[in-house]
Image (tube, helix red, strand yellow):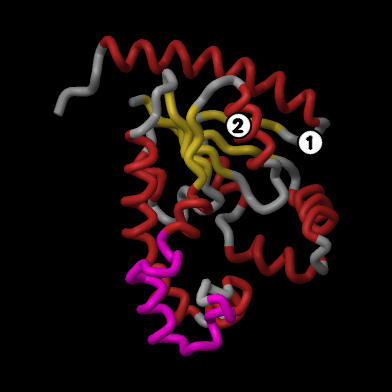
């Protein structure tokens, strides 16, 4: 299975790009979905998180209070490292299971932390949805109704724009409207179909 990693900073339009790939019939695995699955009630990870951080990270119905957990780890590197050490291997396993179920010519892994988390090792190419940081801040603030300062903190925790672009095999420029983004995706889709067919004919040697 030929795999594309789709990433971009907060407010970049990554989710909109993933949605259009789905419309084109491509199987898309959302890393954020996988992250929610591994902490569902009954999963060992949720119990370990509650033991480590206390009952305050659980809602009344027993599910994870993601906002509370985010607040506890966001400015605490040690706690964040503990949480990532627990969850990243579980998320990786869930992603691989979902990718394996793909029946489309190629599959996409949509992940905001594709590079930072090491998930880029699961894909053959990296596609970055990009726009200037000023526009990124503007769109993310409007979409999430968050204070710009909070968005800046999230952006600072993500990979720097230039570093992300340096890792990209393909770039989707999202400075214009959705129609312009979709036209670029259609062109990339044709390219990926050819690459996937070539990979199937000549799989890499092990």
Q: Residue visible at 64% across and 41% down?
A: 14
Checking the image for residue 171, the label placed there is: 2
Q: Which mark is residue 175?
A: 1
Indicate the secondary structure of the residue bearing disc 1. Answer: loop
Examine the image and state in which quarter residue 89 appears: bottom left
Quadrant of residue 194 in the image? top left
Mark 2 residue crowding within 10 angstroms, few (<14) / some (14–19) / many (20+): some
Residue at 82 percent of width and 69 percent of height: 147
Q: Is residue 133 above or below residue 106?
A: below
In the rendered image, residue 44, in percent from the top left (x then y), is placed at 33, 71
| 16 is within the stretch colored magenta | no
Magenta-tinted stretch: 38-61
Quadrant position of the N terminus in the picture: top left
Residue 44 sits above or below residue 119 on the image: below
Could you say where residue 38 lies in the image, as x and y percent from the top left? 41, 61
Regarding residue 167, the answer to whether it shows in the image is no
**10 sits left or right of 76 in the view:** right
**Residue shown at 60%/47% (left/top)?**
162
Q: Where is residue 146 in the image (x, y as percent from the top left)?
A: 80, 66
- Farthest residue in the front direction? 61
């Amino acid at each position: 299975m030929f795999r594309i990693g789709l990433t971009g900073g907060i407010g970049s339009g990554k989710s909109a790009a993933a949605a259009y790939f789905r419309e084109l019939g491509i199987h898309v695995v959302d890393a954020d979905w996988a992250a929610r699955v591994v902490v569902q009630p009954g999963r060992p990870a949720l119990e370990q998180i509650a033991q480590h951080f206390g009952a305050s990270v659980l809602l009344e119905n027993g599910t994870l209070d993601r906002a509370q957990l985010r607040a506890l780890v966001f400015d605490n590197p040690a706690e964040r490292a503990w949480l990532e050490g627990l969850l990243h291997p579980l998320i990786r396993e869930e992603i691989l299971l979902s990718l394996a179920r793909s029946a489309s010519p190629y599959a996409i892994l949509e992940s905001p932390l594709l590079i930072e988390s090491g998930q880029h090792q699961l894909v053959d190419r990296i596609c970055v949805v990009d726009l200037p940081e000023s526009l990124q801040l503007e769109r993310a603030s409007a979409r999430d109704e968050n204070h710009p300062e909070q968005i800046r903190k999230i952006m600072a925790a993500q990979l720097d724009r230039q570093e992300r672009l340096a890792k990209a095999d393909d770039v989707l420029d999202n400075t214009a409207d959705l129609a312009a983004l979709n036209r670029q995706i259609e062109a990339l889709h044709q390219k990926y179909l050819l690459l996937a067919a070539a990979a199937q004919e000549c799989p890499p040697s092990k």
